[in-house]
Each structure stands twice: as C-alpha cells, then as structure tokens.
Amino acid sequence: MKIAEDHPALLDIDMPEVDGLQLAAPDVDVVFVTAHSEHAVAAFDLAALDYLLKPVREARLREVIRRVRERRGRADPVSLAAALRTLLPVTPPVPRITATEGSTARVFDAREIDRFSAANRYVRFVVDGHEQLLDDSLNTLEKRLADHDFVRVHRAELINLRFVVALRRIGGSAEVELASGARVQVSRRLLPEFERRLGARP
C-alpha cells in the first residue's frame, strides 16, 4: 500500500492489517486522526503535520485546515475540510415532542422528559408537574427516541436513561427509580436489554 504524494493523508493509528505509523512516509503530509494519544511522539517523529484526537473538536479541525493551507499551496483546502468534517461526531437533531390541547400545541424537548406511559388510547408524560397527552403510540416514540437514551422497560413504559438513579430487583421482578422519585416496573423480557443499555451488564 502506498500513499499518493500529491495529497495530504488522513491516517488512523490502529487500522486493519497495517499500522498507520508504518504506512506514513516522510515525504507525505500526514494528519493522524486517532483515539490513541500515546502515539503522538512517534507520529511527530515522522514529521506528521498534526495529530487529532477523537472525538475531533471544531476548533482543532479549523487549526489543522489553516496549517495545511500554509504548508501546501497546492492542497485543496475545501476538499480537506470536507474530509476532516466526516470525522466530527454527528449530533442528532433535538427530538421535539408536540402535545396538542384544544387549539394549543405545546412543544417540548424530549430529552427533558423522564418517561412516557401508555394510558388507554394515549401516551402521557409530565413536565413541570403538568400532565400532557399524545396521540402517538409508545412504539412510534420508541423508534423516534432510540438515539436519545430512551429505552422500553415495559409494554406501557418508555424511560429516559438520563433520569435513572437506581435499579432494584424484587424477587423475580425489577423496578427502576427515576430522579423524580417515580418507580417503574421493568418486565422480565425487557430487563436484559435495559441492563445492557444502562451499562449494568456487558
């Protein structure tokens, strides 16, 4: 494997079949993008242009682009910026929940809600002590909020992991305690996945 000399290279340290440090060449501008800070000295011994630690911060990314512009007049900074931006962590959009009451639609940030509970034909949740009702099903909410730390613990309960303070086993069942003091039953079928998401088991 050989790196083209007319383009700056973005290399990770730990790659399948080949070590990024071994692949780097002195006559090629290299930017290491890795989670391994212990290899920084070796990287700069190879005259690496820079060493970015994951997750890559916006300010560091901009600094690397500036240095590449200064060092390589023939480099395409637009292409390099696009390549580096693919390394930035993707932030999911804010999950908004809209509850309608009469002619008023109230919008909430779902991340500030500790639980959603199925109640007859509706889904209920509480914000600032006020109960709100949704027409959405719990299944729909579970899919929408899966990337925002929400997990199903019961056929009628979807909870936000950010608000969990304790998990208690009671006989053959279990319940989770939320920061509000609320206690929610966890079904036996869903307990293993809940524990995994909670970090209570590998």
Image (cartoon, helix red, strand yellow):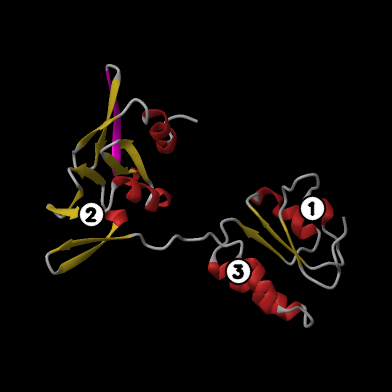
Sooner in the amino-acid sequence: mark 2 or mark 3: 3
Picture coordinates of residue 176, whole percent (x, y): 27, 33
Q: Is residue 75 left or right of residue 57?
A: right
Helix, strand or loop at label 1? It is: helix
Q: Which amino acid type is marked by label 1?
A: Leu
| Image x and y of residue 152, in percent | 34, 39
Locate residue 130, reporting x and y percent: 12, 54
Question: x, y percentage for residue 77?
Answer: 69, 78
Instruction: Name the residue nearer the viewer: 151 or 138.
Output: 138
Report which quarter residue 16 is drawn in: top right
- Badge 1: residue crowd in 10 Å (few <14, some 14–19, many ≥20): some
Q: Is residue 12 above or below residue 7?
A: above
Report crowding for label 3: few under 14, some 14 to 19, many 20 or more residues within 10 A (C-alpha). Answer: some
Label 2 – label 3 distance at C-alpha: 43 Å
Residue located farthest toward the bottom when viewing the structure as drawn: 73
Which quadrant would residue 8 be assigned to in this image? Answer: bottom right
Secondary structure at badge 2 equals loop
Examine the residues drawn in magenta and state their main secondary structure: strand
- Asked whether disc 2 touches disc 1, contact meaning CB atoms under 8 Å apart, the reply is no
Q: Any mark on residue 61, and which?
A: 3
- Look at the image and give the residue range highlighted in magenta: 163-170
Pointer 2: what residue? Answer: 135
The residue under the point 57% across, 61% down is 56
Query: Which sits in the foreground, 42 or 89?
Result: 89
| Type of amino acid under label 3 | Leu
Residue at position x 72%, y 51% in the image: 13
Local crowd size for mark 2, using a 10 Å CA cut-off: few (<14), some (14–19), many (≥20):
few
> Of marks 2 and 1, which one's residue comes earlier in the chain?
1
Circle 1 residue: 21
